[in-house]
Image: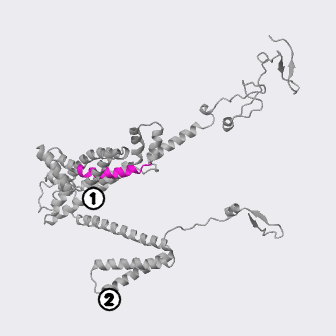
Amino acid sequence: MTVVENIADPTAPAAPVSEASLAAQLPDQWRRIGGPTRSGVLSLVGAAASGLCVAVLLFGQIAPFSGGLGFTVTAYGAFLIVYAVLTGLEENGQAVRDRVMTVILWTAAGLLFSGLALVVGFTAWRGREALPHGNFFTQDMQAAGPLDPLTHGGIAHAMLGTLMMIAIALTITVPLGLACAVYLNQIPGRFSRFVRTIVEAMTALPSIVAGLMVYATWILGLGLQKSGLAAGFAISVMMLPIVIRASDVVLRLVPGTLTEAAEALGAPRWRTVWHVVLPTARSGLATAVILGTARGIGETSPVLLTAGFTAALNADPVSGPMVSLPLAVFNFVKSPQPAMIARGFGAAAVLMALVLILFAIARFIGGHGPGHQTRRTARASRRDAARFAELHAAGLSLFETEPQPAPGPAGDVSGPGLGDEPSALGAADGETTPLEPPAPDNASRSGGTGGTTAPDTAGGAPQPITGESD
């Protein structure tokens, strides 16, 4: 308890006030948690300047060092050391390690993002000459040569070939990959460990080996011709281990309590997997499929061995050679002509855009992660909430029940007692039901000597009534 004096009347005795009420009267004050501080920013800027000065002294005055890479590494190392020293003047050792690791992680993220932006920007900039032309997306190279301008020819045949090959590969890879991942996750054993080892070994399989395997079995062994179907088989061999391994990791993250609850309700294993495990890991499974697609859509050597090369548009994946975008880029950029090189960079930009579109489609199909509602489930939840509110509304017979009989003063269970209160449902619905005393039943209630009792109208106790019973 806290004693608070009365300012208006100092002579009045102090009234005790609880700490909870006193805290409730105080105004709320926002407190900043995390984020950059003034001392942290000054330490960061000072350490960066110190690292740069140390590198300049070592490479220009003290030591005979040279090279841009060495200068950058030396400056960054000196920056980390000085930053750790400056942070240690105000924080403890754990905070110093946390600050230093945060700087290292931000640096790594910046380098990766810079490399990605450089690759995408350079490709789009070099292909800017070919991308504005409409014929670049609607024509093939059958009637265009290396010396023709960019207004002739295009990559329509390569775009169609890539889409058909990746569609064939996904048709084969997604069912097999998800089924194998479910088997590895739900049926542990010696054979599943063997399969997992083979899958992990296949992730490092060179793409040329997959192309040679399909070429030896499909073309040389069976005597079939090069086609988009054979290229789809080769791409699926490359995609399958990626999809299996990533899906297996995602399925391991599903809480075991969900499957235990489903099986406790009597659901079989296959229904638990289909209705509980797979929907929970849907977002991660979509990411696994995207990883496999990104691996297979950029392959060149398996397509060259199994699908051949053509400059004409071929929409039949079963017969005839077919070309993909990576293979078209390879053939365009190796030409010394500037127009062909521009076509190659334009085809590479289209390939990156195609991967981005496939990624967006997969994320849309995958939906949100566990614990996040989609628009469809949110609408269903609102409809259910409205339906439940209507069912609980007053006046519906669904929630109205008859009052339960209570034993009377003499053991009568045919009706409610005189002192019974209205039911909770009646009070909740705003209805009052008058309670009446039970009618006396003199004929059916008899004592051991044949006498009965009748209520006294004067308000007294019941008086015995003598007489012979019928």
Residue numbers of the magenta segment? 236-255
Q: Please name the residue that numbered disc 2 is placed on.
A: 62
Quadrant of residue 438 within the rendered picture: top right
**Three-letter amino acid code of the residue under disc 1:** Met
- What distance separates the C-alpha of mark 2 from that of mark 1? 48 Å
Q: Position of residue 248 (x, y in %)?
A: 35, 50
- Mark 2 / mark 1, whichever is N-terminal: 2
Q: Position of residue 389 (x, y in %)?
A: 57, 40
- Residue 356: x, y in percent? 31, 56
Up/down of 141 relative to 38, above or below: above
Q: In which quadrant is the N terminus drawn?
A: bottom right
Quickly name the residue at label 1.
Answer: 352
* Amino acid type, callout 2: Ile
From where the camera sits, is residue 135 visible?
no
Q: Residue at x 54, y 41 (%)?
A: 386
Considering the image in quadrants, where does the C terminus appear? top right
